[in-house]
Amino acid sequence: MNKKVSLKEIVGTKIVYAIILTSYYWMWARTDWKGWYETAQYVLGVFLFSFFVVQMIRISKYKKEGIDEMAEHNLKRCDSICLKLFVGVMVVVAFGAAILGHTNAVSTGFIGWTIVLSILILSIIRTVMFVVMDSKGV
């Protein structure tokens, strides 16, 4: 834990949060119950708390170190692009759900999974885009 904290590490860990969000959505959206689900919920909760504490420590250490202004600028650019992508996807999902909802062709579970998985995919795209932009020095 004594190594220097990079912005790539902080951005990359957002994928873990997206995976945890997807896992919690699965727990809420499932329609069956098995005995090991409760154990999975507790394990995921403890992992989330532990991961969050470690991330707080790493982020505070990053802020104390010298901040890479070019990387921060690249991150803002990636966030801007990803926001536009996310808004576009959510508009398509919203109108698709409204149109197909009249015919009962789409369930609310499907819409929920579309939203949660798009968050997961977008967090991966954001990380990859940031790493590429930062490595090229764009």
Image (cartoon, rainbow, N blue to C red):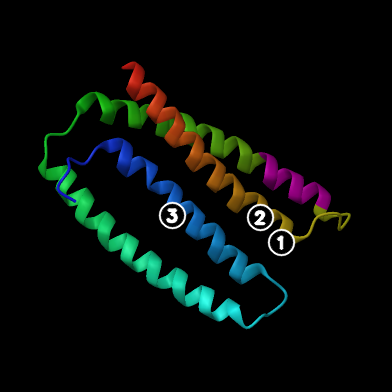
* Three-letter residue code for mark 3: Tyr
Q: Residue at x 16, y 34 (%)?
A: 67
| Residue numbers of the magenta segment | 92-100
Residue located at (59% from left, 77% from top): 37
Between disc 2 and disc 3, the foreground one is 3
Counting residues from the start of the chain, the first of labels 1 and 3 encountered is: 3
Q: Quadrant of the C terminus?
A: top left
Between disc 1 and disc 3, the foreground one is: 3
Q: CA distance from mark 1 to mark 2?
A: 6 Å
For the question of whether residue 138 can be seen, the reply is no
Q: Amino acid at mark 2?
A: Trp
Residue 115 is left or right of residue 83, and the answer is right
Looking at the picture, how far across and down is residue 18, in whole percent? 48, 52
Question: In whole angstroms, how far apart are the C-alphas of marks 1 and 3?
Answer: 21 Å
Disc assigned to residue 86 = none
Q: Is residue 97 magenta?
A: yes
Residue picked out by circle 1? 109
Question: Residue 24, percent across and down?
Answer: 54, 66
Q: Which mark is residue 113?
A: 2
Q: Which residue is mark 3?
A: 17
**Left or right, residue 81 beside residue 28:** left
Q: Residue at x 65, y 57 (%)?
A: 112
Determine contact: label 1, label 2, CB under 8 Å: yes
Residue 17 figure quarter: bottom left
- The reply, left or right, for residue 55 in relation to residue 46 is left
Residue 136 x, y percent position in the rendering: 35, 16
The local crowd at label 1, few if under 14, some if 14 to 19, many if 20 or more residues have their Cα within 10 Å, is few
Residue 54 seen: yes
Mark 1: amino acid: Gly
Identify the secondary structure beneath mark 1. helix
Residue sitting nearer the eye, 3 or 93: 3
